[in-house]
Image: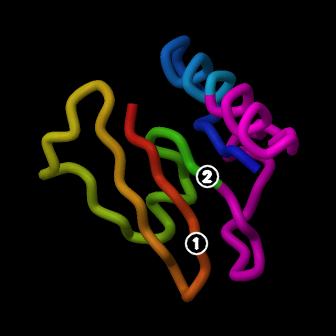
Amino acid sequence: KIVIPQNANEQVSFAAQELVYFFKLSTGFTLNVVTDAVINNDLNSKYLSIDRTKLLKEAKVDTEDLNLGESGFIINSLFGKHNFTINC
């Protein structure tokens, strides 16, 4: 799954759709895009989180002091699971 904020702007929505497209092109698998309003931070869940979702906040990943620019990203493995955060 790709998780975006419930109030995602156009740039974040576009980033999610681009990720869906290129992931499918590379793997043949289509990822679903959902908002953070409909997903919970479950230890068994696997997801890619784009922008500052509630999942990012709940995981206590601090991005405030990082200068990621418009195309920066963070890759984290939380709780032994691989959850990725892309900051737009």
- Residue 63 higher or lower than 8, as above or below: below
Residue 51 in the image, given as x and y percentages of width and height:
46, 39
Q: Which residue is found at the position 32% from the left and 29% from the top?
A: 71
> How many numbered marks have been drawn onto this rendered protein structure?
2
Mark 1 is on which residue type? His
Residue furthest out toward the bottom = 80
| Residue 26 as seen in the image, left or right of residue 75 | right
Residue at mark 1 = 82
The span picked out in magenta is 19-47
Above or below: residue 43 compared with residue 86: below
Q: Residue at x 80, y 48 (%)?
A: 38
- Name the residue located 63 percent from the left edge and 23 percent from the top edge: 18
Q: Which dot marks residue 20? A: none
**Residue 16 rendering spot, x and y as whole percentages:** 63, 29
State the CA–CA distance, disc 1 to disc 2: 9 Å
Q: In the structure shown, which secondary structural element does the residue marked by tag 1 occupy?
A: strand
Within the magenta stretch, is there residue 24? yes
Q: How is the image coloured?
A: rainbow
- On residue 48, which mark appears? 2
The residue lying toward the viewer, choosing from 76 and 54, is 76
Label 2 Cα neighbours within 10 Å, binned few <14 / some 14-19 / many ≥20:
some
Determine the residue positioned at 63% across, 32% down. 19
- Farthest residue to the front: give it: 26
